[in-house]
Image: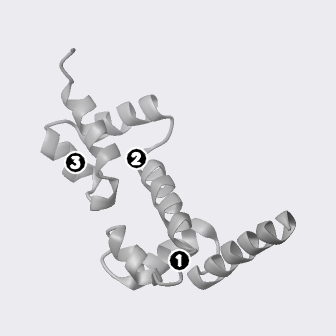
Amino acid sequence: MAKLTMIERAINDIKSHWRDGKTLKEIAERHGVDAGNLERAFHRREGVTIKQFIDQQRKAYVRSHLLDPKIYGHEIGTALGFPNKRAFYRWVQRAFGISFVALRAQVRDKTATKRDDKK
């Protein structure tokens, strides 16, 4: 098995621990690589920037937890590493273009429509 380079280890770290809220600079320092080189290598390998990758993962996580009425929005935000609920709700507004409440209602409506279509 080939030995992983420092950049490959950093990329694997990003992909495995995307919820930790670490900055690019922190990850680069931890692995002893230049942040710019890490960003370029990640983009070459994955086709997206690190921020885009993390946002994609976060969006998928949010969508997968929206249907559970027992989970509050701020709990999802905490699980995603946001420092407080305000930061999470602002991110949802930017990422999805609608508020968390509207997003949850939209997902519920789509799910209900799919169930009605199957009848």
Q: Is residue 37 left or right of residue 45?
A: left
Identify the image quadrant of residue 115: bottom right
The quarter of the image holding the N terminus is top left
Residue type at tag 2: Ile
- Tell me which numbered mark, 3 or 2, is placed earlier along the sequence: 3
Which of labels 1 and 2 is toward the front? Answer: 1
Which of labels 3 and 1 is toward the front? Answer: 1
Q: Is residue 81 left or right of residue 119?
A: left
Q: Give the x, y percent position of residue 20.
A: 27, 60
Q: Residues within 10 Å of mark 3 (few under 14, many from 20)?
A: some
The quarter of the image holding the C terminus is bottom right
- Residue under pointer 3: 27
Residue type at tag 3: Ile
Indicate the secondary structure of the residue bearing disc 1. loop
- Tell me which numbered mark, 3 or 1, is placed earlier along the sequence: 3
Q: Is residue 98 above or below residue 48?
A: below
Please name whichever residue, 76 or 81, is drawn nearer the observer in this view of the structure. 76
Residue positioned 45% across, 84% down in the render: 72
- Residue under pointer 2: 50
- Residue under pointer 1: 68
Residue positioned 58% across, 74% down in the render: 67
Identify the image quadrant of residue 117: bottom right
Please name whichever residue, 96 or 65, is drawn nearer the observer in this view of the structure. 65
